[in-house]
Amino acid sequence: MHDFHYGQGQLMCEGVSIASLIKKHGTPLYVYSQNTLTQHFKRLDQAIAPLDHMVCYAMKSNSNLSVIRTLADAGSGFDVVSEGELRRVIAAGGDPTRSVFAGVGKTAQEIQYALKQGVYSFNVESEAELERINKVAAGMKRKAPIAIRINPNIDAGTHAKITTGTYENKFGIAFEVVEKLYAHAAKLKNLHLRGVQMHIGSQLTEVTPFKKAIEKVIPLVEKLKRLYGIEFFSIGGGIGIVYKQALASGSERWWGSKESKNILTPELYAKALLPLLKPLNLRILLEPGRFISGNAGALISRVEYVKRTGKKNFVIVDAAMNDLIRPAFYDSFHEIVPVSAKGGKPVSSDVVGPICESGDYFCKDRPLPKVGEGDYLALLSAGAYGSVMSSTYNSRPLTAEILVHGKKHAVVRTRQKIEDIWRDESIAPWARNI
Ligand code: LLP
């Protein structure tokens, strides 16, 4: 479900026409729907309501202050991976005590800051990190709440760059040694063994890997509860979204239709996992990122040129891999639709950006409506891992971001000024003398 749809031949986000946003704010432009963010959060939150639970939005997927605030207001906690992200939670008015701190490389300073802010738990990824957290906490005369991240060695069946739960990955502690590490942690005086955590990968489109991983670790979780009185079990994020025919997925009708049978909905997820999790009698944490923000955002771009080579039809747009790196990085699919609906016979097209790299493309040989200079295209499902992964490569400024709410909209990040790209740079003093 999401709030991008056509109304009278014009692409809309909730009650606002994308064309009107382009007119006011230019392109490239990220547009987010507040309603989609809230509805996705609520839908998941309700599906797991029978459990004592806390949904901690993985803000790495989209950390715009307005997005964080929207989710904080809906009742979300946060999954953060850096001091910067935790500071964003606070800057947006979110609750640091409902935030978990994950990541394999937490620095001593980050640990200290997070402890001061009272984070709910540190998700620990190595023995050395455990020692470091204990040391920092001792220095502050505090007890740090921790959960060890179990690597269950289960293949999530997703893209190699976003799978995390096998021994090929740098994440977590091998299933076989987790118990020993808890025994060690229990001896460290400044740790509070609060929970246990797991995350097997991202963009999972089936429930089976989640189920398998949970089934595998349950006996261990029960034992840890018995031995150390742990209070929570975080099952991570990873719920996949619909990228293909994302626009069609906006209609309620689609959720109930036959095709949706194989889509991982919050209800299917809950139906499969609740029976396993309920008997544990622990608080269950979820860390969804993409599920909440993915289909809540689109990247809008202008067609600058159409170039026909002997073989191909290149549509050159003003957005590029620096704005949305996912196709270049993961070969990922984003549906591309015209902002003003177009009929006619589709043309096999490569939509590409202006950056000097062959990898700078959004699609290859895809049948798309015939477009020309001055037309606008929307790259859908760009709300997660879109803007947050952008850069200023080729000295292209960071795009503006818009949040839509009903018929209202607000600029939630202004377009970066070109001079600001090098604002923090300088010419070495000796060069000035030459
Ligand atoms: N929890 C942990 C420990 C994670 O590492 C991640 C994502 C999440 C939760 C949230 O996963 P989600 O619900 O969004 O699938 N840039 C890639 C995705 C990287 C995911 C990194 N970890 C992409 O564009 O597909």
Image (cartoon, rainbow, N blue to C red):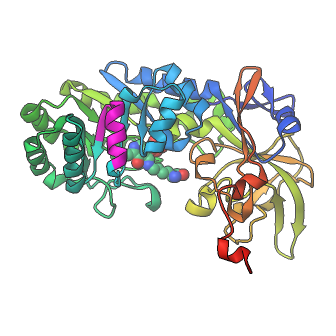
- Residue at left offset 17%, top offset 38%: 191
For the C terminus, which image quadrant? Answer: bottom right
Majority secondary structure of magenta residues:
helix
- Residue at left offset 48%, top offset 41%: 85
Percent across and percent down for residue 391 are 64, 56
**Residue 80 location, quadrant:** top left
Percent across and percent down for residue 311 are 82, 74
- Residue at left offset 59%, top offset 37%: 64
Let me know if residue 353 appears in the view: yes
Q: Judge whether 281 appears above or below 190 on screen.
A: above
Toward the viewer: 303 or 117? Answer: 117
Let me know if residue 195 appears in the view: no
Residue extending furthest toward the front: 433
Q: Which residues are magenta?
A: 109-122
**Residue 296 location, quadrant:** top right
Residue extending furthest toward the right: 373
Percent across and percent down for residue 288 are 45, 37
Left or right? Give the position of 18 relative to 100: right
Left or right? Give the position of 142 relative to 329: left
Percent across and percent down for residue 193 are 17, 36
For the N terminus, which image quadrant? Answer: top right
Q: Residue 57 magenta-drawn?
A: no
- Residue at left offset 88%, top offset 57%: 304
